[in-house]
Amino acid sequence: MDSPERTLVIGCGALAHELLAVIRASGWPHLVVQCLPADLHNRPERITGAVRQKIRAARARGGFSRVFVAYGDCGTGGALDRMLAEEGVERIAGAHCYEFLAGSAIFERLADEEPGTFYVTDFLVRHFDRIVIRGLGIDRYPHLAAQYFGNYRRLVYLAQQPSDERIEAARAAARRLGLAFQLRDTGLAPLARALAFVNRETIQWAG
């Protein structure tokens, strides 16, 4: 049987570890991951241009039969999808990484249960101070925490590979923001099923 042709997966840096873990566990060596900086989450107006640049650079270099994007809309207001339609590139299904890391059904249930939920992932737990506290300027202007998070009621940790240390760090993040804490152990199966779309496959996740 011929090997599948190489596909470039352009992903968010916040998903790099999880994307690579799924690809290794699923036996998809033909999927090659290139990630953009996770800090773009704080500047969503820059995401569309950065992804387009990656797509065009990959096509100019050659070597891939297909390009796929592992980004949600991520606050671009539909601009990312409009650009991808122009470029003829598909992306992973879901409005944001929280949806495809949790799975759509679970995420919808969490959102309905408490709309005022701030979600963190393994990546955001590891980099909470850099991305959230320093990235949003809360370290310099503590009063901004109330402005950014005043309408939130709880922090939900969507854990891909939880550990005692990460769970405690997520609890500490919730306390710092004055939010209730909830742990949801999602594992990597929802992301594996979402990424299987690249291969037009239905898989049984065994990772």
Image: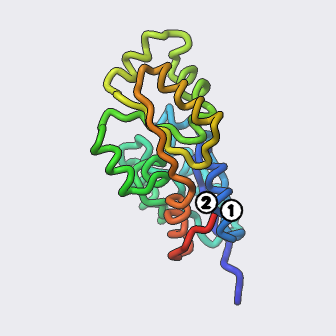
Q: Amino acid at mark 1?
A: Val
155 left or right, relative to 207:
left
Q: Is residue 193 above or below residue 94?
A: below
Instruction: Please state which of residues 116 and 3 is positioned toward the viewer in this rendering.
Output: 116
- Marking on residue 68: none
Q: Is residue 100 above or below residue 124?
A: below
Instruction: Please state which of residues 112 and 137 is positioned toward the viewer in this rendering.
Output: 112
Tell me which label, 1 or 2, sits earlier in the chain: 2
User: Distance of mark 1 from mark 2, alpha carbons?
Assistant: 6 Å
Dots 1, 2 in contact, CB < 8 A: yes
Residue at x 47%, y 45% (from the top left corner): 184
Looking at the rendering, in which quadrant would you find the N terminus? bottom right
Looking at the rendering, in which quadrant would you find the C terminus? bottom right
Figure quadrant of residue 177:
top left
Q: Classify mark 1: helix, strand or loop.
A: strand
- Mark 2 Cα shell of 10 Å, populated few (<14), some (14-19), many (≥20): many
Q: Which residue is mark 2?
A: 9
28 left or right, relative to 44:
right
Q: Position of residue 121 (x, y in %)?
A: 54, 41
Q: Amino acid at mark 2?
A: Val
Residue at the bottom extreme? 1
Q: Position of residue 10 (x, y in %)?
A: 60, 55
Q: Position of residue 7 (x, y in %)?
A: 63, 68
Q: Is residue 198 above or below residue 152?
A: below
- Marking on residue 32: 1
